[in-house]
Amino acid sequence: MALEDVKALTFDVFGTVVDWRRSIAREAAALLGAGKGLERDWNAFALSWRNRYQPAMERVRSGNRGFVKLDVLHRENLLEVLEEFEIDGLTEAEIDHLNFAWHRLDPWPDTVAGMTRLRTNYPLASLSNGNVALIVNMARRAGLPWDAVLGAEVARAYKPMPEAYLSAADMLGVAPAECMLVAAHNDDLKAAKVAGLSAAFVCRPTEVADEDQTKDREPWEGVDVAATSFEDLADKLGC
């Protein structure tokens, strides 16, 4: 696949575009720590919540459960995490507020500037397992310049199901190979390539740990381009 043949860029969001771990830890600390006077490891809280993400979606992918949007899965998982960390007594409104922390994630420092440059040459679309309201609210808060919000809720399929990738290319009016997925996760990129998309790896070395993160430190050899940031990707794509 020649890079000059790429006509649209799609993006994984959690971990690639935004720093979910620090953002969730910040929100939990504000509501439960400062707000309730609780002392917990809020980084561990964020990781535990995120670790339930794939198993929850797998029940949908496997057909054991009908499609529900990610906000629903996140809330169900949050109730389990609150129990794990022995946190009770929250009102329904407080639980909803914390659940919607996923709508308030902070972008990585290079995200907005890099996306703005990339958008000069390409339409940009989210290709996320996040639901539409989540991605829209996040974008408005963080200034993310999407041209379209696509992904699981639109396709009614969670990545890495091929329908999620192929529907994005179809909705953007391009052939799968002309649609590039930008992601920090090699598993996501491998699935995109199997579906026929092009793939760009962007390293996020502190997504799950401040130090010594081992997974996804290097790109899978099958990617079409690898970059250290969105600004670096813009350089490599001539934006």
Image (spheres, rainbow, N blue to C red):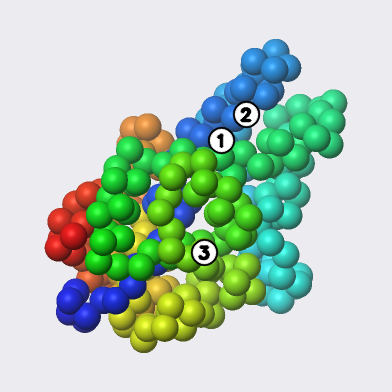
Q: Secondary structure at mark 2?
A: helix
Image quarter (top left, top right, bottom left or bottom right) of the C terminus: bottom left
The residue singled out by tag 3 in the image is 149
Q: Secondary structure at mark 1?
A: helix
In this image, 59 relative to 158: left or right?
right
Say what amino acid the circle numbered 1 marks.
Answer: Ile
User: Does label 2 or label 3 sit earlier along the sequence?
Assistant: 2
Residue 24 image label: 1
User: Does label 3 or label 1 sit earlier along the sequence?
Assistant: 1
Residue 186, quarter of picture: bottom left
In this image, 17 relative to 41: left or right?
left
Residue 102 horizontal/vertical position (percent): 59, 44
Q: Secondary structure at mark 3?
A: strand
How far, Cα to Cα, is label 1 from label 2?
A: 6 Å
In this image, 54 relative to 99: left or right?
left
Q: Residues within 10 Å of mark 3 (few under 14, many from 20)?
A: many
Disc 1, disc 2: CB below 8 Å?
yes
Q: Residues within 10 Å of mark 1 (few under 14, many from 20)?
A: many
Say what amino acid the circle numbered 3 marks.
Answer: Val
